[in-house]
Image: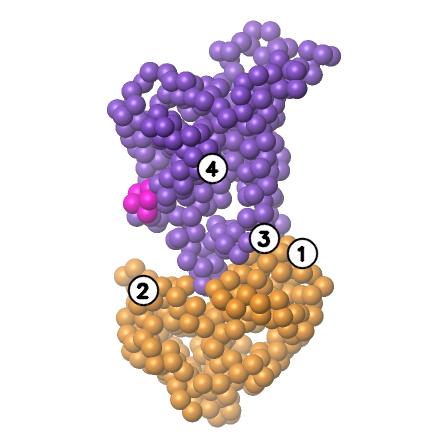
Amino acid sequence: MELFANQVLAGIATGAIYACMALAVVMIYQAIDHLNFAQGEMAMFSTFVSWQLMQWGVPYWGAFVLTVAFSFAAGIVIERLLFKPLAKAPILTNVAGFIALYAIINSVAGLIWDFTIKQYPTPFGSSPFLGSQLISTHQAGMIGITLLMLLLLFFFFRFTRVGLAMRAAASLPESARLVGINTSWMIALGWGMASAIGSIAGMMIAPVVFLEPNMMLGVLIYGFAAAVLGGLTSPFGAVMGGFLVGIFENLVGTYIPGVGNELKLPIALALIIVVLVVKPAGLFGRAIVKRV
Amino acid sequence: MTAMLNVKDLRAYYGQVQALHGLSFSLNEGSLTTLLGANGAGKTTTLRAICNMVRSTGAIEFEGKPIGTRSTENVVRLGIAHVPQGRGTFTNMTVEENLQLGAISRSDKNAIGSDIERMYEHFPVLKQRYTQQAGTLSGGEQQMLAVARALMLRPRLMLLDEPSFGLAPLIVRDLFRILGKINREEKVTILVVEQNAQLALELADQAYVIETGRIVMSGNAKDIANNEDVRKSYLGY
């Protein structure tokens, strides 16, 4: 029983990484109705920017704030330059755009910062959290930050006019325009926010997986799995999905013989497929009620 | 009376297909005008062209300003509310959120709360359902919500695209009564596109009849309703 409890706790700790990333995934899905395959690379690039700022002597939280602001602006610029012209193009064209963006950002990061693995600092320290060896203060801090972001997003979408306008633009663009919402800028804003959230995820994840251009490869797939499990329409679901994927991964690794580290990634992929087949709306996704 | 909306030589296209062939008409301030015609005559296209939701040429002036090149959201922000065909309800949001969205482009935030209350007076059924997902409302209730949402803009001009579509006759009567009241009491100029010609002519003071993208008849609503030839050849009753 103690083994089980410990594994759940460790699962929550790794799950925090996925939850963080899933939040960014859901954010962009809300805004543009697609998954952005370059999301992880954008987050990785942001993390490198913060690392560079720290190398130049900027203190951690200063670099943190500057990076979030930079990522927000960069997300908007990417949307305006690359994806606004593709707004009316077929989905596959957009997917090609995402993949191109993925390759470009990955290579540029490698070009600027090379592919050697770098240490990345944490503001929370890495001692055991509340005396537990399974969860460190950094992981606890990361869970805290993820939940804080979730709370802020909830208030933003629920109680602000911009949040309401963004939801309207995402669900029915034509009706949104007819109440005077500039839907094109709402999409840009969605990109900015997703990019900013992704940068926070990257900066939280980097101390665990270390900083290098391919750091997000696996994380993004787990993030997708978490978002799909929780429901792509629900930020809350995405975070819960993240924790669940983390716990699931750990329990399977512990109790099912033969599943080592090598099979952990396929588990995430299998989870995506199972959820999509069995419950496409995800655990917390809103099934839209429609009266005919 | 001055013309609030002036449309001259309006031509609209869906790809290569021309849907409007040089439409000209004007709406007087404070009037309630109906645009009648059969299926495919170009009624919906006319409304969509005013809001720049379809490619068109020609001159459209609203209160003296040309609006032909403005984006849809910027046309709306001038005070032109458009209740589209199919109502355009934000079905996964609550009734109250739908009303708030109607006022989203307004800068006088303090007045929005009292305007929502006013809508609940016009449409009491919405008050009972204000926390409900709008998609769960009946067709008639959704149409009421669509009109209320449009009014939340505090529009100068309201465009309605077949508000009677798919509704029971009693509900249509109720809706049209409210539209008349809004026109008189709130001084909102209204252009309503209808297939239900008989009812629309009772409500309106001006009428235009369009056929295959051209205006074939215009005048006082009563005169058109009383002209038997017109009724038989264009309105089918």
Mark 1 surroundings: few (<14), some (14-19) or many (≥20) residues within 10 A: some
From what the image shows, is residue A137 above or below residue B145?
Answer: above
Mark 4 surroundings: few (<14), some (14-19) or many (≥20) residues within 10 A: many
Amino acid at pointer 3:
Phe
Q: In which quadrant of the rendered image does the N terminus of chain A lie?
A: top right
Secondary structure beneath label 3: helix
For mark 1, what is the residue?
Answer: B132
Q: Quadrant of residue B18?
A: bottom left
Q: Which mark is residue A197?
A: 4
Q: Residue at x 61, y 78 (%)?
A: B178
Q: Chain of mark 2?
A: B
Task: Write down the region rendered in magenta.
Answer: A77-83
For mark 3, what is the residue?
Answer: A159
Dots 1 and 3 on the same chain: no
Mark 3 surroundings: few (<14), some (14-19) or many (≥20) residues within 10 A: few
Foreground of the two, A261 or B54: A261
